[in-house]
Amino acid sequence: MAKYHIWTVGCQMNKSDSERLASGLDQLGLAVTDRPEDADVVVLNTCVVRQSAEDTATGMLGTLRRGSTPRSERLLAVMGCMVGPRQDDLRRRFPHVDVWARPQEYAPILRAVGDRLGIDAEGCIGQLIPGAPAVATFVPVIHGCDKFCTFCIIPYRRGRQVSRPLDEVVHETALLAGRGVRDVTYLGQTVDAYGHDFESPRDLADLLYAVHGIDGIERIRFLTSHPSDMTTRIIDAVAGLPKVCENINLPFQAGDDAVLEAMHRGYTHADYLDLVSSIRSRVPGVAISTDLIVGFPGETDAQFERSLDMLREVRFDKVHAAAYSERPGTIASRKQPETVGRDEKKRRLAAVAALQERIQAEVNAALLGAELEVLVDGTTRGAPSGRSRTDKLVYLTGGNVDVGDTVRVRITGTSPYSIQGEVLAPATAGRRA
Ligand code: SF4
């Protein structure tokens, strides 16, 4: 039996794309293997959001160069954000790659595999939905992005915003529930812009209301939100629908207004704080996480301090900070020359990490003794573990628990990055913690 291996780097969208491609390869009768050297079909699902991610992908391409392994008949495909609309340069640099496919473009890969195996791919592949999904699974609902932040390559690689039809998402969610999914996260680069591109515009709240009644689904989340698209209607849906988790990822990217303007983010420091306050007043106990860039071109020490101010003011549950990395083809790469050196970016990242670790330690410590609802989704370092509704990683003790169980837990210990909980009793599905 022919085997395939999919190597994935990057965001949840890429992970989800890989699951969907795997579903197509399964339907073609291929078996999965963990070892690329044993595979007849190897697919690299790439990310170019930062130079380090692109370097990882090109390094992997180097090790897979045809002729350097015994599998000279192997079909090698590259998909994801490394593949833009023009591929001439990539084809010249990597002639050993058989297929190039843009994000979510599964057909060229499946067709090439079908041709190689003598199977009519179009005739035997149904919907690309994971056959054995994890208990907590991602579902992309909007592709691309219209925002064109000056530092970001995504709109050039994933294209303009296109939302999937609402009834298609509802149907897929029901199918996934039937396959054991309990926690679904709707994905988009700007997920809160969902539906804005329809002929009769809808919004993310419509989607949340539409999927809420699906049996089997206990938790609903969405990721990633743009502050400019987060509306009162969406916040009210989070507040009012019991299955929608009180957990919002809301990148602020920079704390200083001049830097935000240079990034073309479309809001100010004060706008962002107002939005957080509106969310917190409507959704008690909500966990807010964020993304932040340090060392954007022109960012001074004083402007960077405004980002630290934002961390102190909001006290996020989680922060993903990255050093600015110039991406050829973006507005910033053409018009905003780098001014912050590598050592200074490292210093700023370390300052963010130290401050946020203190804040997270305090935020999590406040949970000591509380009772939370945890969905068991696997084991971490040998112990059963799961996620709270607010997406805290919880290590469990006591009780006999299985993946897919939802249990009530008393918090017995906390750290900045995880919490420990003693299992009390099975919880009722769909209830708030
Ligand atoms: S909102 Fe900005 S950072 Fe996010 S994907 Fe779109 S362009 Fe990139």
Image (cartoon, rainbow, N blue to C red):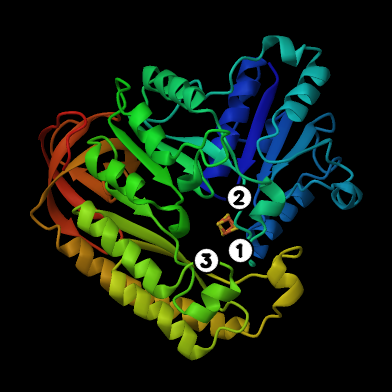
Which numbered circle lies on residue 145?
2
Task: Give the mark toward the camera: 3 or 1.
Answer: 3
The structure residue drawn at horizontal position 73% and vertical position 24%, both measured from the top left corner, is 110
Determine if the C-beta at disc 1 is less than 8 A from ligand 1: yes
**Disc 3, SS:** loop
**Disc 2, SS:** loop
The structure residue drawn at horizontal position 65% and vertical position 15%, both measured from the top left corner, is 125
The structure residue drawn at horizontal position 27% and vertical position 71%, both measured from the top left corner, is 359
- What whole-number distance in Å separates the C-alpha atoms at marks 2 and 1? 10 Å
- What whole-number distance in Å separates the C-alpha atoms at marks 3 and 1? 9 Å
Q: Is residue 233 left or right of residue 389?
A: right
Q: Which residue is mark 1?
A: 149
| Residue 41, visible in the rendered structure | yes
Which numbered circle lies on residue 76?
none
Q: Which residue is mark 3?
A: 266
- What whole-number distance in Å separates the C-alpha atoms at marks 2 and 3? 14 Å
What amino acid type should be assigned to the residue bearing mark 2? Cys
